[in-house]
Image (tube, helix red, strand yellow):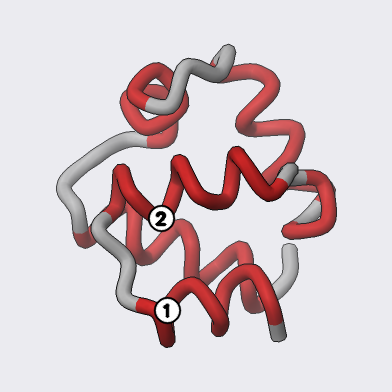
Amino acid sequence: MSDKMQLLKQKITGADMTQDALASKIGMNPSTFYRKVKIGVDAFTVGEMRSLANALNLTGKEVKDIFLN
Protein backbone atom coordinates (compact mmCIF):
# COMPACT_ATOMS: atom_id res chain seq x y z
CA MET A 1 0.00 0.00 0.00
CA SER A 2 1.28 3.44 -0.90
CA ASP A 3 2.28 6.10 1.61
CA LYS A 4 -0.62 8.21 0.33
CA MET A 5 -3.14 5.51 1.14
CA GLN A 6 -1.53 5.03 4.56
CA LEU A 7 -2.00 8.76 5.16
CA LEU A 8 -5.64 8.49 4.05
CA LYS A 9 -6.17 5.61 6.49
CA GLN A 10 -4.61 7.70 9.28
CA LYS A 11 -7.02 10.54 8.51
CA ILE A 12 -9.96 8.13 8.57
CA THR A 13 -8.88 6.81 11.97
CA GLY A 14 -8.23 10.35 13.19
CA ALA A 15 -11.78 11.28 12.23
CA ASP A 16 -12.98 8.40 14.40
CA MET A 17 -14.48 6.64 11.40
CA THR A 18 -14.15 3.25 9.79
CA GLN A 19 -13.56 2.73 6.10
CA ASP A 20 -17.06 1.27 5.86
CA ALA A 21 -18.60 4.33 7.53
CA LEU A 22 -16.64 6.71 5.30
CA ALA A 23 -17.63 4.80 2.17
CA SER A 24 -21.28 5.00 3.19
CA LYS A 25 -20.95 8.70 4.00
CA ILE A 26 -19.70 9.47 0.49
CA GLY A 27 -22.23 7.16 -1.15
CA MET A 28 -19.79 4.44 -2.20
CA ASN A 29 -20.13 0.70 -1.72
CA PRO A 30 -17.62 -0.32 0.99
CA SER A 31 -16.13 -3.08 -1.18
CA THR A 32 -15.53 -0.54 -3.94
CA PHE A 33 -13.85 1.77 -1.44
CA TYR A 34 -11.56 -1.00 -0.17
CA ARG A 35 -10.63 -1.93 -3.73
CA LYS A 36 -9.78 1.68 -4.61
CA VAL A 37 -7.66 2.07 -1.47
CA LYS A 38 -5.79 -1.11 -2.41
CA ILE A 39 -5.20 0.12 -5.99
CA GLY A 40 -4.14 3.56 -4.86
CA VAL A 41 -4.99 7.21 -5.23
CA ASP A 42 -5.26 7.02 -9.03
CA ALA A 43 -8.35 4.84 -8.65
CA PHE A 44 -10.41 7.69 -7.15
CA THR A 45 -12.24 10.15 -9.39
CA VAL A 46 -11.96 13.88 -8.78
CA GLY A 47 -15.51 13.87 -7.42
CA GLU A 48 -14.69 11.04 -5.03
CA MET A 49 -11.57 12.86 -3.87
CA ARG A 50 -13.67 15.96 -3.21
CA SER A 51 -16.22 13.91 -1.27
CA LEU A 52 -13.49 12.26 0.79
CA ALA A 53 -11.87 15.62 1.53
CA ASN A 54 -15.19 17.07 2.68
CA ALA A 55 -16.16 14.02 4.75
CA LEU A 56 -12.79 14.01 6.52
CA ASN A 57 -12.50 17.82 6.78
CA LEU A 58 -9.10 17.71 5.11
CA THR A 59 -7.06 20.88 4.74
CA GLY A 60 -5.79 21.96 1.35
CA LYS A 61 -2.33 20.68 2.24
CA GLU A 62 -3.72 17.31 3.31
CA VAL A 63 -5.67 16.99 0.06
CA LYS A 64 -2.51 17.80 -1.88
CA ASP A 65 -0.40 15.36 0.14
CA ILE A 66 -2.87 12.51 -0.25
CA PHE A 67 -4.29 12.99 -3.74
CA LEU A 68 -2.04 15.26 -5.79
CA ASN A 69 1.64 14.72 -5.01
- Residue sitting at x 29%, y 52%: 56
* Quadrant placement of the C terminus: bottom right
Q: Where is residue 27 in the image (x, y as percent from the top left)?
A: 47, 17
Q: Is residue 17 above or below residue 26?
A: below
Viewer-closest of 9 and 28? 28
Task: Please identify the quadrant where the N terminus is shown.
Answer: bottom right
Q: Is residue 27 above or below residue 66?
A: above
Mark 2, residue position: 53
Q: Residue at x 72, y 45 (%)?
A: 44
Q: Which comes sooner in the sequence, label 2 or label 1?
A: 2
17 left or right of 61 in image: left
Q: Residue 50: horizontal and vertical position, in percent?
A: 50, 49
Mark linked to residue 46: none
Tag shown at residue 62:
1
Residue 5 sits in quarter:
bottom right
- Label tally: 2
Identity, as a three-letter code, of the amino acid under mark 2: Ala
Q: Do the residues labelled 2 and 1 touch (CB within 8 Å)?
A: yes
**Amino acid at dot 1:** Glu
Q: Is residue 1 above or below residue 28?
A: below
- Distance from the alpha carbon under mark 2 to that under mark 1: 9 Å
- Relative side of 56 to 66, left or right: left
